[in-house]
Amino acid sequence: MCEYCSSEGCICGSSDDKIQSLCECEVIGVPKCSRCGCEAQPWWSDIKIPGGQSVTDLIWDLTGDETYFPATKNKLVQTLTDSEQDGNWLRQNLPDQAYRNTEDIVTALISKMAPIVSEQQPTDIIWKYPGEALCGGQQLIIAENQQAALVSKTGRCCDIFTVGKYTISMENCPLLAAQSRKSLGGFGHVVLNGSAVFFSPSKEFELSLSVMGQTRALRRVMARCVARVRISIPKQFFEQIAAKCQYNSQGTITALQRYCDEILKKEMLAHEMDELTANSSLLEKSLNDGLKVAGLEPLKISFSSVGEFGPGMFMPPGAKMGDPKSYEQIKQMAESMRAAQISQMQAKRQQLTPQEHQQTQSVPQAATASSSGIQTIACPNCNNSNPQTSKFCGNCGKPLQPQKKVCPGCGHQSDPSIKFCGNCGMHLE
């Protein structure tokens, strides 16, 4: 069943027990399917027609309008009133002749197709040529330090070209041709359904990763690293990562970060906390192997921190509280950590039986020894019970021990409530 018929709800080409051959309207050069009567998409439907969007819109509007033709060049230019700029382009480039249908117009215009060249910006890791089809005779130009992969509409990475000048044809692009719509015998136009994606195999780019996962004992662990990589196997990279975000450069980075997050979370879950903190190469190796599977060459992977989740764990390096941007980042991190902690505690409470829940409510939340012999301390802010070895509250994240005042004169430490130093008498603010 062809893509067009599927969208229209047509069942031509299918049966109860098997899928038959494709509809005839999937074949280029057939105006209608003789079995179901569906109109075929024009052979030029996915080609990026030169001349601007108004020219393309005009051709689509005239499709099927037999009363408009035959049409002269002047008639077509006068009809195009949406864009003065596109009208001028059509006047200068459209041959002066009579046109029987829209196919004649497109045939005349594709001879004006500009070469397929990269418009990749310095910040882009890949760049996709607009349009979902390439036409025979079109030029493909690959500059120095560049390569281009022809990718099908289904996300398959087909033919790859290195530096040089090429002509789009069935012979030059055999893999993409095999993934494209078939042509009626004797049809004069070559159309390959796909596009060119440019990239630089020597271009290096960085991935900044901040990942929170769980250990085998379900302790919360966080890791922060930067990975410097470059594309080494285009087919794997395009099919596994880039195709999922339509070969958009920024979207590809985001998809790659999610891919790396899953790799690190899986590795975290296979180890205990002390294994991860004592040997960060465990995470480095798993990330290194995962990047290679995605068609990337890891050049350098550097972990700046691996440890148990807690306040300040992911504070940006060199962050200044006076910097509004840094302050907002820290604030968001703190709110995120607190919400995660509260959610975890609520989940644990829901698992308690009514009797256990009543027992926990009846125990005074103060510094005392629990029934299991573990010393606890109450949070001065929210009164939550915490292990005595904790420095911060597991419920609100506040310090469990009040900060002592340090005398600026003699350095003596005093309780926060003391106004004057007991050692030298200096006033403590």
Image: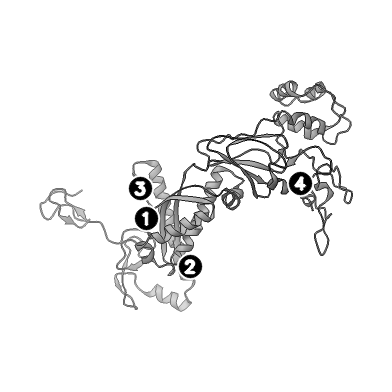
* Sequence-earlier tag: 4 or 2: 4
* Sequence-earlier tag: 1 or 3: 1
Gap between marks 1 and 2 measured at Cα: 28 Å
SS of the residue under disc 1 = strand
> Does residue 104 appear to the left or right of 156 in the view shown?
right
Q: Residues within 10 Å of mark 4 (few under 14, many from 20)?
A: some
Mark 4 or 1, which is nearer the eye? Answer: 4
Question: Which residue position holds label 2?
Answer: 347
> Does residue 225 appear to the left or right of 15 in the view shown?
left
Q: Residue 54 in the image: x percent, y percent?
A: 72, 30
Q: Residues within 10 Å of mark 3 (few under 14, many from 20)?
A: few
Residue type at the position of mark 2? Ala
* Sequence-earlier tag: 3 or 2: 3
Question: Which residue position holds label 4?
Answer: 181
Question: Which residue position holds label 1?
Answer: 305
Q: Quadrant of residue 52?
A: top right
Residue type at the position of mark 3? Pro
SS of the residue under disc 4 = loop
Q: Residues within 10 Å of mark 2 (few under 14, many from 20)?
A: few
Gap between marks 1 and 3 measured at Cα: 11 Å
Question: Which residue position holds label 3?
Answer: 317
Mark 1 or 3, which is nearer the eye? Answer: 1
Mark 4 or 3, which is nearer the eye? Answer: 4
Residue type at the position of mark 1? Ser
Q: Nearer the viewer, residue 141 or 348?
A: 141
Q: Are marks 3 and 2 in contact (CB under 8 Å)?
A: no
- All told, the count of numbered labels is 4
Mark 1 or 2, which is nearer the eye? Answer: 1
Residue 89 badge: none
SS of the residue under disc 2 = helix
Q: Residue 172 in the image: x percent, y percent?
A: 68, 41
Q: Residue 134 in the image: x percent, y percent?
A: 70, 39
